[in-house]
Amino acid sequence: MKVLVIGGGGREHAMCWKLARSPQVEEVHCAPGNAGIARDATCVKLADGDVPDYARDRGIGLVAIGPEGPLVGGMGNMLRARGFKVFGPQAKAATLEGSKVFAKQFMKRHGIPTADFDVAESFAEAEDAVRHFGDRVVVKADGLAAGKGVIVCSTIDEGVQAASTIMVDRAFGEAGRRVVVEKRLEGYELSLIAVTDGERYKMMIPAQDHKPLLDGDEGPNTGGMGAYCPARNIASPELVERIEREVIVPTLQGMREEERPIRGVLYAGLMIDGDGSLGVLEFNLRFGDPETQPQLTMMSSDLAALMLESDGGNVSNVPVTWHEGVAVTVVAAAEGYPVSPRKGDPITGLDGVEKGDERIVFHAGTSLDDGKVVVSGGRVLGITARGPDLDTARKASYDMIEKIGFKGMQYRRDIGVKGL
Ligand code: AMP
Ligand code: GLY
């Protein structure tokens, strides 16, 4: 089978890398891909509307959509209407990620635990809602905002300012036409990711992301500066089982009842409190980035089979297995990330650092310029190692990253430390 992956970041590199190792995959294509993906796949620049023709001409048997933009935009619908097998939901299901108002109201309808909230359609309504919730409040733009549309506040003034930034200044454009104002939850964050055919599901190995830019969880939030898995310290088998029962199963069922079956991924971002309460912060209908990089490094079974069954099949039929040990991904980001990443500098030291399927440099924001690999995005590389335990895998990742360099490269020194 030939597979086409849509996207060009670290998540999509890990998907291409893993699919290229599938016994049933003969060719991997990726649009647009990046300099590293080009080692595992044929990269091609395609406008969304040109994807079906390209897939038909190349005899593509499965299209796997990586990012949320094309999913919410209906690429799954367009491809299924043309007869393709797709990994990734229809737009109606992707609304669970694409509209925070929809997601919150859905959770309320189906009794899925989440923070108390109000929906505001105007700045005046948002201001009232902030005053109602008080100091500990979160203001969220309704629509997609590349992970930036959520403002966590500690005072009423900050809450009002956040509502103004989103609704008056329109810092995130039309995504801020409506906002969710909700109670700020306390605790620690955990993300659990399921691959589903809409009814049955298989859990991915639990991973811990590191969202803040700097060591010790300081600095601004990013898309994620590193991840490791399995994260046994935060995701005990009992807790995972409880989240399946209280969140994953009722969400899949509720979406089926509302005729929005999820074919592909259900990613639940949660806040877990010490007193045993849990609440859903957000849903995504795609794999996580960087979580996918260590997760697919750990997967010892066939990803293509799982993806195929997610679209009209039964994922229970696919064995999903994991290597022993632990995988760690440390993200190397560009100078100025996450605000204004510096681009164009050459990356050195990439040759010879990788080893088998245990030491891999996944590329996120890279491109080829005159045969040289250069920085072209905020998160540049996902330096990934698998080892018998967390300590060994961490050391291997940091050993690799020390050999790699580009002007202004920044990375966290403490990825995985919480799990030691
Ligand atoms: P979201 O995109 O909704 O996951 O929000 C992004 C980040 O904002 C989350 O990863 C949390 O760190 C934080 N966040 C969102 N909602 C809340 C909440 N109700 N309480 C505390 N933190 C939150
Ligand atoms: N790493 C967080 C996300 O993929 O949403």
Image (spheres, grey):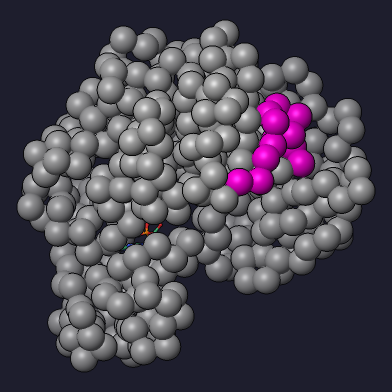
For image coordinates 23% across by 23% down, the residue present is 200
Location of the C terminus (image quadrant): top right
- On the picture, is 100 further left or further right than 32? left
- On the picture, is 47 further left or further right than 181? right
- On the picture, is 409 further left or further right than 221? right
As for residue 40 lying within the magenta part, the answer is yes
The answer to whether residue 413 is visible is no
Closer to us: 302 or 231: 302
As for residue 272 lying within the magenta part, the answer is no
- Residue 390 % position (x, y): 60, 29
Closer to us: 418 or 125: 125
Q: Quadrant of residue 201?
A: top left
- Residue 270 % position (x, y): 31, 49
The quarter of the image that holds ligand 1 is bottom left
Magenta span:
35-46
- On the picture, is 107 further left or further right than 55? left
Location of the N terminus (image quadrant): top right
For image coordinates 83% across by 46% down, the residue present is 368
Q: Quadrant of residue 203?
A: top left
- Residue 290 % position (x, y): 56, 43
For image coordinates 26% across by 75% down, the residue present is 178
Q: Count the marks: how many? A: 0
- Does residue 280 lie above or below 249 as drawn? below
For image coordinates 31% across by 10% down, the residue present is 317
Closer to us: 366 or 336: 366
The answer to whether residue 338 is visible is yes
